[in-house]
Image (cartoon, rainbow, N blue to C red):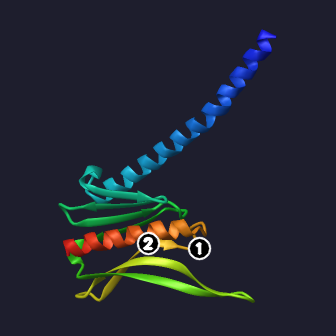
């Protein structure tokens, strides 16, 4: 009777500890991947990006000293990395792309993309920073809401720097 109780106790301990261990391992792998990407874009110093935000597996990092901006999207496979030097940027704006969904009874408009467009007017080039893409995100409204807030927050930060 004592042996079976011990086995049940060990099983319950493993059942609760295993998901926690897997979660910690996944977070460590993502953190190491993010640090390596940031080192690559800031001359070997990942700590140079002093302002960072992370929502829905998207990391936005900004180096106020060098005026460099990096967006890392871990939702896409392989990871999508967008990098821009803000010394070259003259204008930024948010573009929201939507599509119309028609049912028999209702018509709805669904946002499919939220992009922050950084524009260099001298070279006539535009760099899109995709904050929300319906194709890669889970179609949950809260993801769009949070990613949209993140895009608006970073647009304000970028406009202050420009």
SS type, badge 2:
helix
Picture quadrant of residue 49 = bottom left
Residue found 46% across the figure and 82% down from its top: 96
Task: Specify the farthest residue to the right.
Answer: 1
Q: Which residue is mark 2?
A: 148
Assign the C terminus to one quadrant of the image.
bottom left
Task: Specify the farthest residue to the left.
Answer: 65
- Indicate which label's residue lies in the foreground, 1 or 2: 2
The image shows residue 81 at horizontal and vertical percentages of 42, 65
Picture quadrant of residue 131 = bottom left
Assign the N terminus to one quadrant of the image.
top right
Give how far apart the Cα atoms at labels 1 and 2 are. Answer: 16 Å
As displayed, is residue 150 above or below residue 123?
A: above
Q: Which residue is mark 1?
A: 135
The image shows residue 123 at horizontal and vertical percentages of 26, 87
As displayed, is residue 99 above or below residue 85?
A: below
Q: Is residue 147 left or right of residue 98?
A: left
Residue found 36% across the figure and 58% down from its top: 53
As displayed, is residue 144 above or below residue 31?
A: below
Task: Specify the farthest residue to the front.
Answer: 105
Sequence order check: which comes first, mark 1 or mark 2? 1
SS type, badge 1:
loop
Q: Are marks 1 and 2 in contact (CB under 8 Å)?
A: no
The image shows residue 156 at horizontal and vertical percentages of 28, 72
Label 1, residues with CA under 10 Å away: few <14, some 14-19, many ≥20: few
Residue found 61% across the figure and 38% down from its top: 19
What mark, if any, has residue 124 been given in the picture?
A: none
Counting every numbered tag in the picture gives: 2
Label 2, residues with CA under 10 Å away: few <14, some 14-19, many ≥20: many
């Amino acid at each position: 009777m004592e042996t079976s109780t011990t086995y049940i106790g060990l099983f319950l301990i493993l059942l609760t500890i295993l998901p926690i261990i897997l979660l910690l391992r996944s977070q460590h792998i993502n953190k190491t991947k993010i640090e390596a990407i940031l080192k690559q874009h800031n001359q070997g110093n990942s700590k140079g990006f002093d302002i960072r935000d992370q929502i829905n597996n998207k990391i936005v990092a900004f180096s106020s000293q060098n005026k460099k901006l990096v967006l890392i999207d871990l939702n896409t496979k392989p990871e999508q990395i967008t990098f821009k030097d803000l010394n070259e940027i003259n204008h930024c704006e948010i573009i929201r792309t939507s599509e119309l969904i028609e049912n028999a009874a209702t018509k709805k408009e669904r946002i499919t993309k939220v992009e922050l467009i950084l524009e260099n007017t001298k070279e006539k080039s535009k760099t899109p920073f995709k904050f929300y893409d319906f194709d890669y995100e889970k179609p949950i409204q809260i993801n769009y809401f949070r990613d949209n807030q993140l895009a608006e927050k970073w647009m304000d930060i970028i406009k202050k720097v420009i």
